[in-house]
Amino acid sequence: MAKLIVCSPTPSSGVRHRYILMRQVKGFAERSGYAVRMLWPVTSGVSFCRHEELFAPVPGVEIENISQEDHAALVKCVQAGKKVQHRGESLSVLRDGQKPAERFFSWDLEGSGMLMRLCGGNMPAIWAAPCATLQSQLEPYIKKHAIRERLGIRVRVEEVPHRDRKPHRIQSELDSVLKSLFRIPWYARVLLVTDSEYIQQTLASHFMDAVFLPKRFGQRESTGRYIYRKDKEEMATFLKEVSCLCECRKIINIGGFLNDGMVRTRLLQEPYDAAAFLHVKRA
């Protein structure tokens, strides 16, 4: 039988997490002669979306959607140290210090990280391309609002208090981010991409020419309203936002976003004074 790696992420993992996993496994597989099959859990981490509802196919990776219930059973096998049953085959879970078998199961970033280290790291990036339906909606918007001439501002607000990524949904942290962005002059043309209504409204009032895709912000907390992460429509909007963001001339990246590794040369660092000149000269 041909060499095969079957992999899967944790149920709560988001799209960025899943594409990091995929990149690491695929990089090892291409160097070592394996085929790759990723089990994509249709769970709250991706707003219960199947892969093809959001993304175009990934060359070199077979993606199989798996229900929340079937994925929960898989997780129990991994946690119990048992083999994973898949398509009538028993697959050993790759463990630290083990040599990969001809056909095996790789669990989340733990397994993909082992594979990355085995081949020396430096994995080629994977572009997470939106599906054809979403892509067809993007180009008219990009042209209408001259997105390629704008400064993209991404502010991702962390909802889990103990994670290191800032800002959290804490007023002082939100205001600190805004203070740094207020250094950019009001006349800069910007695209705003954020999951915080407070951040979006405050920046939109600062910049004379700010555009953003409409969102509902369905989750209310003490510091304002945020995107409800289980909303399938909002997940599709996020992918359109990411594609627009990657088209911008320069980008401020606070909190990270899908595909940010592919546009690294266009990312601005603090202080953001250089952004003031984007409206008068090309990068």
Image: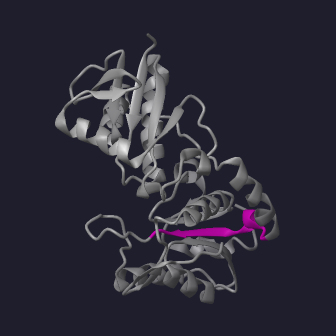
Comparing 56 with 126, the one in front is 56
- Residue 241 image point, x, y percent: 62, 63
Query: Which residue, as the protein is rendered here, is positioned at the far bottom?
Result: 205
Comparing 240 with 69, the one in front is 69
- Left or right for 93, reference 188: left
Q: Give me the residue at 53% from left, 72% from top.
A: 194
Q: Give me the residue at 55% from left, 87% from top.
A: 202
- Residue 226 image point, x, y percent: 47, 77
Comparing 140 with 184, the one in front is 140
Q: Give me the residue at 60% from left, 60% from top.
A: 236
**Does the segment drawn in magenta span residue 153?**
yes
Residue 236, above or below 220: above
- Left or right for 50, reference 243: left
Residue 264, above or below 91: below
Q: Quadrant of residue 107?
A: top left
Residue 160, above or below 62: below
Query: Which residue, as the protein is rendered here, is positioned at the far top?
Result: 1
- Residue 162 image point, x, y percent: 25, 67
Q: Which residues are magenta?
A: 145-156
